[in-house]
Image (cartoon, rainbow, N blue to C red):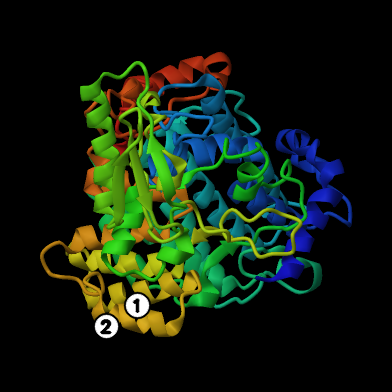
């Protein structure tokens, strides 16, 4: 972790406070950006931070309530939590608006950077502009993969007050085109220029190293093309995959696109998980790790288990019988909880108390046990906190304690390897899929600081260490989903695109146990649009809904149909 970078983030966001209220003015009139002290490098920092680690409001309501939990990686609803794990599966205007407004409101930051560096801008620089094109594609990938059709081609245009919503096919083609332009423009260049023209330390991903930006662009190009492949009307993914496979990728540990977390900066400028985890009091706002994450890691002797989660607290745990539940329903719900302990391999003893309620005794801080997602509010008394693993301290570390905090994963080298393996397995490219897969596993573990000796043991012994030839697409999808742990937007997209983990993608069907939500148990395919476009851009929004389908969570996106 490069601590000096974190201080730069705090310093720059503080210094730029006087400028941020002018972003709307900049978006209206590029000529407003003037002065010898305005440099592109000061805007790239804000563009990165505000996209990847926004303030606590969208971080909590967009990332954690929706993306991370739709991805099947985190859960609420245990006894002591303030929220049922059904939260997010039924529409909430406030939570949805926080997510929509976060994405929609981001455009000013990026448009400003592109105006400065683009043709005719005050700091015209094709190389710096190429970095902006990569950021633009990253941003729109998040935005469209959450909602579907969104304003794209007319966003940022000074002549358009009410931008049209573009189809996902056109958005994907536009993003791939921008990435190709960036790759070609960067060529062999290593920096955006000398002196103030060099993004340098202000670039929190790569310290201004353009060859890494080129590799990121090509890695994103492959991601988008693989996702678009096979969708209705797709006529560009195969050439894009071929082009990408011939280019450079994020390869090693130093190539990972990560956003370091600042230890000082206010959560209202840039948030971390710890800002939610610690700031609501008690266990109210804390969360557990899902059974899908824990079981996949544990069943394959994956050494990332202790990096992702902590053992369940355990101890002597009473499962009380609510007055509303008769004996049969109590037995059903209790047995569901016990079956989950069995599935995780926990060893425990059972006794009955004087009320005939089940008391479970198991060793403290010993077993990794994941929580089943989407449990309904009636499961609250059964779903005891002591039964479940919570995220590792590194992930939810509080600020201002001089301890390392897990960075935000933007795009990893591991995923770049896994995607190349996927392209080969699907017959879209040639090469040694298993070699790419195994290199991806190695990089995935290095990213989470697994000991090299443990990596070697895993690669030698684990059933997940080699493609089997029969379920290769599933194995790759699961590893892509796991490496995007804590990056819920991408992990959720992987589930929708591939159908894996299959148990998660299948949804739920027992209303005695699960919260069925507005989806009637189905897996969420998108988020509903926020209120803003309904009041400000209703005609264009309605055209999008007419094309895409009803504005509900169950409507599949273009690439997922």
**Can residue 248 be seen?**
no
Please give the name of the residue rendered at 65% of the width and 62% of the height, measured from the top-left corner. 128
Q: Residue furthest right?
A: 36
Give whichever of 144, 502 is nearer the camera: 502
Q: Looking at the image, is mark 1 or mark 2 earlier in the sequence?
A: 1
In the rendered image, the vertical position of residue 412 relative to residue 276, given as above or below: below
Q: Which mark is residue 169?
A: none
**SS state under label 1:** helix
Q: CA distance from mark 1 to mark 2?
A: 13 Å
x then y, percent, for residue 444? 41, 70
Say whether residue 142 is visible.
yes
Q: Which residue is mark 2?
A: 460
Residue 513 falls left or right of residue 425: right
Q: Secondary structure at mark 2?
A: helix
User: What number is the disc on residue 439?
Assistant: 1
Please give left or right for residue 474 compared with residue 352 in the image. left
| Viewport quadrant of the C terminus | top left
Q: Are marks 1 and 2 in contact (CB under 8 Å)?
A: no
Q: Write the residue at 32% across / 50% down.
A: 292
Q: Is residue 436 left or right of residue 320?
A: left
Splitting the image into 4 quarters, where does residue 511 fall? top left
Q: Residue at x 47, y 15 (%)?
A: 539
Q: What is the x, y in percent for residue 243?
A: 34, 66
Q: Nearer the viewer, mark 1 or mark 2?
A: 2
* 320 sits to left or right of 299: right
Residue 12 on image: x %, y %: 80, 55
């Amino acid at each position: 972790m490069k601590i000096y970078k974190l201080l730069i983030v705090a310093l720059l966001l503080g210094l730029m406070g006087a400028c941020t209220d002018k972003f709307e003015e900049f978006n209206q009139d590029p000529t407003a950006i003037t002065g010898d002290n305005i440099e592109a490098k000061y805007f790239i920092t804000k563009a990165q931070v505000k996209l990847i680690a926004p303030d606590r409001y969208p971080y909590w309501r967009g990332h954690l309530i929706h993306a991370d939990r739709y991805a099947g990686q985190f859960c609420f609803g245990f006894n002591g939590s303030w929220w049922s794990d059904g939260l997010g599966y039924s529409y909430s205007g406030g939570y949805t608006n926080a997510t929509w407004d976060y994405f929609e409101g981001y455009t000013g930051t990026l448009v400003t950077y592109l105006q400065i560096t683009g043709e005719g801008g005050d700091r015209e620089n094709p190389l710096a502009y190429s970095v902006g094109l990569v950021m633009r594609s990253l941003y729109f990938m998040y935005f469209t993969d959450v909602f579907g059709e969104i304003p794209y081609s007319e966003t940022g245009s000074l002549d358009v007050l009410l931008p049209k919503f573009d189809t996902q096919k056109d958005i994907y083609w536009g993003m791939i085109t921008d990435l190709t332009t960036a790759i070609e423009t960067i060529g062999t260049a290593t920096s955006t220029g000398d002196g103030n023209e060099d993004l340098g330390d202000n670039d929190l991903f790569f310290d201004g190293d353009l060859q890494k930006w080129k590799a990121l662009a090509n890695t994103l190009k492959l991601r988008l093309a693989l996702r678009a492949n096979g969708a209705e009307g797709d006529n560009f993914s195969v050439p894009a995959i071929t082009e990408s496979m011939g280019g450079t990728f994020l390869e090693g540990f130093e190539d990972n696109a990560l956003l370091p977390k600042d230890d000082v900066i206010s959560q209202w400028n840039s948030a971390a998980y710890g800002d939610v985890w610690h700031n609501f009091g008690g266990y109210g706002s804390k969360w557990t790790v899902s059974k899908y994450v824990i079981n996949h890691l544990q069943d394959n002797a994956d050494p990332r288990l202790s990096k992702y989660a902590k053992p369940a607290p355990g101890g002597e745990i009473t499962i009380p019988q609510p007055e509303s539940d008769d004996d049969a329903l109590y037995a059903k719900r209790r047995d569901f909880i016990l079956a989950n302990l069995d599935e995780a391999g926990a060893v425990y003893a059972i006794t009955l108390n004087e009320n005939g309620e089940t008391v479970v005794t198991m060793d403290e801080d010993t077993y990794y046990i994941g929580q089943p997602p989407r449990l309904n509010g009636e499961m609250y008394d059964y779903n005891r906190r002591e039964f479940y693993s919570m995220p590792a301290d590194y992930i939810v570390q509080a600020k201002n304690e001089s301890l390392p905090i897990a960075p935000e994963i933007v795009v990893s080298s591991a995923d770049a390897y896994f995607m190349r393996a996927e392209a080969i397995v699907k017959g879209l490219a040639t090469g040694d899929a298993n070699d790419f897969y195994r290199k991806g596993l190695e990089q995935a573990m290095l990213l989470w600081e697994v000991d090299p000796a443990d990596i070697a043991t895993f690669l030698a012994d684990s059933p997940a260490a080699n493609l089997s030839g029969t379920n290769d697409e599933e194995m790759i999808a699961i590893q892509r989903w796991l490496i995007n742990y804590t990056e819920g937007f991408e992990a959720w997209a992987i589930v929708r695109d591939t159908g894996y983990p299959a148990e998660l993608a299948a949804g739920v069907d027992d209303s005695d146990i699960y919260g069925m939500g507005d989806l009637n148990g189905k897996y969420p395919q998108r988020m509903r649009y926020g209120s803003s476009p309904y009041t400000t851009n209703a005609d264009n929004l309605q055209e999008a809904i007419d094309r895409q389908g009803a504005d509900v969570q169950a409507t599949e996106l273009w690439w997922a149909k």
